[in-house]
C-alpha cells in the first residue's frame, strides 16, 4: 500500500539521545521553542495530524498552530472504544479551525457516540478487530480527501504504522538528554521485529544541528 492508495504519512517526534519520547513519569517536554516552531510549520503543510489515545490521555494536546497563519486541518485520534474524555482539548479547543475525527472499530459499542457528535466530532469505524484497522482507515481518510497526515505518536501507534509499513517520511528531533528507564516510552514501542533485516529501512536525506539539538529527515527506502 503506497502512494495513491493511502495518504502520505510523515512521522514527527522529538526524542532523547537514547530514543525516549517521554520520561518514565510521562514528562514529554523535549522540544525547545525553535523546535515547536518547526513542528508547527510542518503541521501547516498537511491535511491532518494523527495521534493515539495514549497521547491524548497523557498530554491532553491541542494539536493546533500557535506561530503561523494557516487554513486549519483535521485532528485525528485512534481510540478503538471511544473512551476519550469528552472534555479533552482535542475536542473542545477551536473545533471550527481543527475539526476532530475519532477512529474506532466496527465492533465498538460505546453509548456515548451522540455526546461526541453533538460536539461536531466525526466518528469513523475501521475494522472488526480489537484495534483500529489502520489500512482500512487509510483508504477511508483518502476517500475523504485527506492526502497527507503528520503522525505525532505515541510509541504504540508509531509501531503499528511501522509494522504495516505505512510511513513515507520522518522528521526527528534529537534533544540533548539521556533519560533512561525501561518504562519510559520509546519512539517505537510494540512487539518489534526479530531481525535487523526485517526492520524498516529509511534513507537519511537531511541533517541539521543547532543549540545541541539535531534534526534528522528520512524517507522510506523500499529497495
Ligand atoms: N516526544 C514526542 O514527540 C511525543 C509525541 C507524541 C507522544 N509522545 C508521548 O507518547 C506517550 C503516549 O504513547 P503511548 O504509546 O502510550 O500511546 P499512543 O501511541 O499515543 O496511543 C496508543 C493507543 O491508541 C489506540 N489504538 C487504536 N488502534 C490502534 C492501532 N491500530 N495501533 C496502535 N494503537 C491503536 C490504543 O488504545 P485503545 O485500545 O483504547 O484504542 C492504543 O493503546 C505519551 O507519554 C506522550 O507524551 C511523545
Image: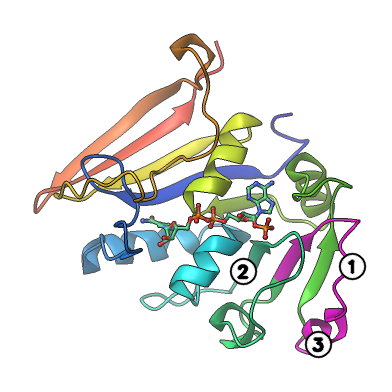
Q: Give the range drawn in magenta.
A: 101-119
Residue 142 numbered mark, or none: none
* Residue 219 seen by the camera: yes
Dots 2 and 1: beta carbons under 8 Å?
no
Q: Name the residue under label 2.
A: 73
Q: In this view, does 191 lie to the left or right of 182?
A: right
Q: Which of marks 2 and 3 is in front?
A: 3
As for residue 19 lying within the magenta part, the answer is no
Residue 115 numbered mark, or none: 3
Dots 2 and 3: beta carbons under 8 Å?
no
Name the residue located 26 percent from the left edge and 61 percent from the top edge: 31
Q: Nearer the viewer, mark 1 or mark 3?
A: 1
Which quadrant of the figure contains the C terminus? top right
Q: Which quadrant of the frame does ligand 1 lie within? A: bottom right
Mark 1: secondary structure: loop
Distance between the alpha carbons at the discs numbered 2 and 3: 22 Å
Instruction: Give percent across and percent down for residue 106.
Output: 90, 56
Instruction: Give percent across and percent down for residue 158.
Output: 53, 44
Q: Is residue 71 left or right of residue 83?
A: left
Dots 1 and 3: beta carbons under 8 Å?
no
Instruction: Give percent across and percent down for residue 27.
Output: 30, 65
Query: Is 117 placed above or below 51 here?
Result: below
Mark 2: secondary structure: loop
Please report whichever mark, 2 or 3, sits nearer to the chain's N-terminal start.
Answer: 2
Q: Name the residue under label 1.
A: 109
Q: Nearer the viewer, mark 2 or mark 1?
A: 1
Which quadrant of the figure contains the N terminus? top right
Amino acid at each position: 500500500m503506497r502512494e495513491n492508495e493511502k495518504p502520505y504519512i510523515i512521522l514527527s517526534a522529538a526524542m532523547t539521545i537514547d530514543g525516549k519520547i517521554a520520561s518514565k513519569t510521562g514528562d514529554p517536554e523535549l522540544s525547545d521553542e525553535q523546535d515547536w516552531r518547526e513542528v508547527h510549520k510542518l503541521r501547516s503543510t498537511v491535511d491532518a495530524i494523527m495521534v493515539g489515545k495514549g497521547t491524548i490521555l497523557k498530554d491532553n494536546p491541542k494539536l493546533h498552530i500557535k506561530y503561523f497563519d494557516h487554513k486549519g486541518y483535521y485532528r485525528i485520534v485512534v481510540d478503538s472504544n471511544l473512551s476519550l474524555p469528552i472534555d479533552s482539548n482535542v475536542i473542545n479547543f477551536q473545533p471550527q479551525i481543527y475539526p476532530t475525527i475519532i477512529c474506532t472499530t466496527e465492533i465498538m459499542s460505546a453509548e456515548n457516540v451522540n455526546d461526541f457528535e453533538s460536539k461536531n466530532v466525526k466518528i469513523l469505524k475501521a475494522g472488526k478487530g480489537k484495534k483500529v484497522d489502520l489500512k482500512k482507515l487509510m483508504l477511508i481518510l483518502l476517500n475523504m480527501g485527506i492526502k497527507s497526515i503528520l503522525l505525532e505518536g505515541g510509541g504504540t501507534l508509531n509501531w503499528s504504522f511501522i509494522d504495516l509499513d505505512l510511513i513515507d517520511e520522518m522528521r526527528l528531533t534529537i534533544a540533548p538528554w539521556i533519560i533512561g528507564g525501561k518504562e519510559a516510552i520509546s519512539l517505537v514501542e510494540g512487539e518489534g521485529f526479530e531481525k535487523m533485516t526485517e526492520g524498516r529501512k529509511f534513507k537519511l536525506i537531511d541533517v541539521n544541528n543547532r543549540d545541541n539539538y539535531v534534526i534528522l529527515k528520512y524517507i522510506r527506502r523500499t529497495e
